[in-house]
Amino acid sequence: MVVRLALLLVVGCGGKKSAGEDATRAPVVAVDAAGSGAGSAAAKGDVAIRVEWKAVPTSARQSPGRTSCNTARPPAVTPTTMWGIPDAIVLADRAPAPAEARITLAECAVTPRIAIASTLIVESTVERPATLTLTKHGTIGSLGALQAGDARAIQLPIAGHAVSVSLDAGGVYRLAIAGSDDAAWIVNAPGGVTDVAGLATLRLPPGAHEATAWLPARGGQEWKVVKSTVTVEANAVAELAIDLGPR
């Protein structure tokens, strides 16, 4: 019994750490691949980018005509009372990568008419077979000089049918109803689409970033491409206004 008690005392004392040892032990910090603490690596900021156009031509604000269903086509631009421009693409380096977007064919229209996506889902609500064409017009490096390439036919035989299409990185595409001018534009690049107030908010890592606002050609209105820069701070909101007006 005496021998057994002695062994237990030895094992118990050997497993303890002194107060001095605990005080000098360095804290464990998660480190990312770059060697910095995980907390600092995750810190990002937001940038609220407002796209505006203070002198929109009257022609761009008017309906460009009628659809084959005899409904009015939407104007090329629908500015707010404070000149905000909805349905414009905003691109920024190191913004979150695009994911999936869904575009729906209704009678004589596709909605939404602009999207950011790496994978495009096209679906129909029309109770008859329909054909759309998907055409790559270039890349984000040539937004001011896009040219149509070969068109790909997308067959939608019945309402509820959907087709999934993977898009090239950096590609700019136009999805159109066959035999019609009614179309949507899709861009596969990091960024976002301005809302009804002309605003897009992106989460970016701290530092200086180049931002690009792009309004596609619609209803006789030519492309508008404007670049700017913004500095983002961690856990803060930066603001940037991009005017599409004459330069």
Image: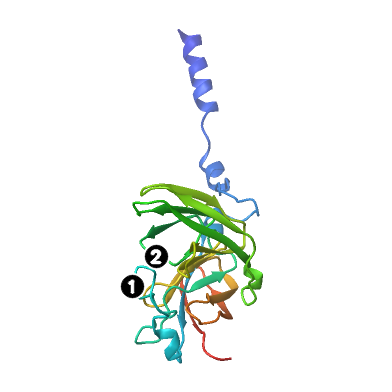
Residue 12 placed where, x, y %? Answer: 49, 24
Quadrant where the N terminus is found in the figure: top left
Res. 109 mark:
2
Numbered disc in front, either 1 or 2:
1
Q: How many tags in the picture?
A: 2
Residue 204 visible in the displayed image: yes
Q: Quadrant of residue 73?
A: bottom left
Tag 2 or tag 1, which sits nearer the N-term? 1
Residue 141 placed where, x, y %? Answer: 66, 70
Q: CA distance from mark 1 to mark 2?
A: 10 Å
Residue 68 placed where, x, y %? Answer: 39, 69
Q: Are marks 1 and 2 in contact (CB under 8 Å)?
A: yes
Say what amino acid the circle numbered 1 marks.
Answer: Thr
Looking at the picture, the colour scheme in use is rainbow
Res. 49 mark:
none
Res. 71 mark:
1
Quadrant where the C terminus is found in the figure: bottom right
Relative to the observer, which residue lies in front, 34 or 202?
202
Does residue 83 sit above or below 93 in this rendering?
A: below
Few, some or many C-alpha atoms within 10 Å of disc 2 (few <14, some 14-19, many ≥20)?
many
Say what amino acid the circle numbered 2 marks.
Answer: Ala
Give the structural element (helix, strand or loop) at label 1. loop
Residue 235 visible in the displayed image: no
Does residue 141 sit above or below 34 in this rendering?
A: below
Relative to the observer, which residue lies in front, 10 or 190?
190
Residue 125 placed where, x, y %? Answer: 35, 54
**In the picture provided, is 193 more to the left or to the right than 125?**
right
Relative to the observer, which residue lies in front, 101 or 105?
105
Relative to the observer, which residue lies in front, 35 or 163?
163
The residue shown at (47%, 55%) is: 131
The residue shown at (56%, 42%) is: 21
